[in-house]
Image (cartoon, rainbow, N blue to C red):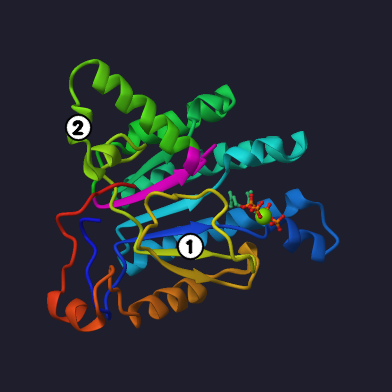
Amino acid sequence: MGTAEVGSERMPNHVAIIMDGNGRWAEERGLERNAGHRAGLDTVREVVRAAGDLGLKYLTLYAFSSENWERPKGEVTELMYLLEHYLEEELDEALEQGVRIRAVGQLDKLPPTTRKAVDHAMDVTGGNTERHLILALSYGARAEIVDAARSLIRSVEAGVVDPARLDEKTFASHMYAPDVPDPDLMIRTGNEYRVSNFLLWQIAYSELYTASVMWPDFHRADLEAAIEDYAGRERRFGLTGAQARLNGKPSDDGVSSG
Ligand code: IPE
Ligand code: IPE
Ligand code: MG
């Protein structure tokens, strides 16, 4: 949580979004669900641009969950296709704007062409440092924690980590993107109030914001409203309000994970 600060009137450093409601958006219009995913992709473009304009450093988008593999085959295929298409299409702009694209999740489960598009985008933008667009793909937070545990056990077996000295910071260093700071703000669209296996470790002290609109109806102004709401909150990290206001930085020696 390296960049967390108590107080308000600031831009979040990292916003994570659960982009939910594509299917219902389409169903409400008598369209097939995939039409909702296509409309949702337009929102992704708009929100990524808006985030750039606002100077947001880290944006994580929950694009496809571990559980989403169980959806009808035609829907999974469309989502993979849209993802490939998006990555190919946005690459030039990402390069131009200094955006590093990366993915977190069990990428080995992606179809080969999707995997290729993801790897290519990560390779080509890997040197960018200005802004970070993190796509959670084939992502499940419990799987991430189990994968981290597996990696940690290997480090123990290799004699690199002493179990007696294991702490949160070391544990977090085995997550998928350990250098990414924890989200300051987590937004969920689609009028649902749940976390759906997203970033369970990293959202320990994130501020939560839900939007009742379906993802295809979420626009720049909605992102700005969420950030404005965030800016008016007081983060306490377990301290009293008075302590938090005095301290400014309660946990800057804490874990950085993401
Ligand atoms: C998009 O919304 C999220 C993805 C899994 C891509 P949904 O497809 O979950 O839409 P709803 O929740 O069924 O409306
Ligand atoms: C969460 O949405 C996953 C993504 C946004 C990719 P879901 O629609 O899969 O979550 P549930 O099923 O409503 O919890
Ligand atoms: Mg949903």
Label of residue 135 in the image: none
Q: How many marks?
A: 2
- Mark 1 falls on what kind of element? helix
Can you name the residue that lies furthest to the front here? 164
Name the residue furthest top: 158
Tell me: 168 left or right of 143. left
The quarter of the picture where residue 175 lies is: top left
Query: Where are the magenta residues, as a range?
Result: 130-142
Q: x, y percentage for residue 52? A: 36, 61
Q: Could you say which quadrant of the image residue 30 lies in?
A: bottom right
Is 158 above or below relative to 48? above
Q: Which residue is mark 1?
A: 47
Residue 53 appears at what percent x and percent y? 35, 67
Report the residue marked by disc 2.
Answer: 164
| Picture residue at 42% right of the left edge, 52% below the top | 60
Residue 238, position as x, y percentages in the image: 28, 69
What residue do we see at 18% from left, 18% from top?
A: 159
